[in-house]
C-alpha cells in the first residue's frame, strides 16, 4: 500500500529507528505493524541526497510525490532538508540483480523528471543492495548513505550508487 510523505507516523517511525530511540527488534516489529509495514517483507533501502545547498527537499513535497509515483511498493520519509529515504519491497519474482536493475531504471527515469520540475536540483542516490527486514533498517540506511557519499566521490560521473559497488571502500 502506497503511503504519502504526509504519513507522519511513518516519518516518526523512521526517525525513531535512525536515532536509536527504537532499536529493539521486537519493538521495531510491533511498531512496523502500526505503520502498515509487514515485518516479514524484505526491503531495499535507498537514500536520495540533494547537493545544492540553496534547495531544501522539504520545500518540494509535490515534486517528490510525482517523483515517487513510479515506485510500485514503496514508502518514503524525508530525513532532513536534503535527504530522503525510500523503502522498496523486494520483488520475490525477480533475482537480486533484476531487482537492483529495476530500481536503478526507476531512479534514472524519476531523477530526470525531478530535475525537469525543480530548477537547479542536484540529486544522487545510494542503494543498500542487500534486501533486509525492517528491523535492520538502521544498518541498511547507513549502507545506502555510504553508497551515495563515497560513491559520489569515487564515481563522479554517476548519480546512482550501490553499496556493493564501493568494494574495498565500504566499511
Image: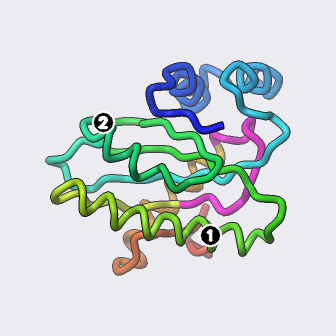
Question: In the image, 128: left or right of 149?
Answer: right
Q: Residue at x 71, y 74 (%)?
A: 98
Q: Which residues are magenta?
A: 127-138
SS label for mark 2 = helix
| Position in image of residue 67 (x %, y %) | 41, 52
Camera-nearest residue between 4 and 153 = 4
Picture quarter with the N terminus:
top right
Q: Residue at x 59, y 55 (%)?
A: 143
Question: In the image, 151: left or right of 45?
Answer: left
Number of disc labels: 2
Residue 27 is drawn in which quadrant?
top right
Give the CA separation, mark 1 to mark 2. Answer: 26 Å
Residue 113 is drawn in which quadrant?
bottom left
Residue 56 is drawn in which quadrant?
top left
Camera-nearest residue between 66 and 13 = 66
Q: Residue at x 57, y 26 (%)?
A: 10
Q: Which mark is residue 102?
A: 1
SS label for mark 1 = helix
Which residue matches tag 2?
58
| Position in image of residue 35 (x %, y %) | 66, 24
Picture quarter with the C terminus:
bottom right
User: Closer to the N terminus: mark 1 or mark 2?
Assistant: 2
Residue 136, relative to residue 51: is it above or below?
A: above
Amino acid at each position: 500500500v502506497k503511503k504519502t510523505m504526509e504519513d507522519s507516523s511513518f516519518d516518526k517511525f523512521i526517525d525513531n529507528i535512525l536515532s536509536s530511540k527504537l532499536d529493539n527488534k521486537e519493538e521495531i516489529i510491533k511498531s512496523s505493524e502500526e505503520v502498515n509495514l509487514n515485518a516479514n517483507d524484505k526491503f531495499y533501502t535507498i537514500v536520495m541526497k540533494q547537493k545544492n545547498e540553496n534547495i531544501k527537499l522539504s520545500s518540494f513535497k509535490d515534486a517528490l510525490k510525482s517523483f515517487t509515483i513510479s515506485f510500485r511498493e514503496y514508502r518514503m520519509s524525508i530525513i532532513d532538508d536534503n535527504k530522503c529515504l525510500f523503502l522498496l519491497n523486494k520483488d520475490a519474482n525477480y533475482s537480486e540483480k533484476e531487482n537492483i536493475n529495476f530500481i536503478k531504471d526507476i531512479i534514472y527515469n524519476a531523477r530526470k523528471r525531478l530535475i525537469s520540475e525543480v530548477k537547479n536540483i542536484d540529486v544522487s542516490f545510494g542503494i543498500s543492495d542487500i534486501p533486509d527486514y525492517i528491523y535492520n533498517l538502521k544498518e541498511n540506511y547507513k549502507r545506502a548513505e555510504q553508497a551515495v557519499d563515497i560513491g559520489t566521490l569515487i564515481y563522479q560521473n554517476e548519480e546512482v550508487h550501490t553499496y556493493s559497488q564501493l568494494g574495498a571502500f565500504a566499511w
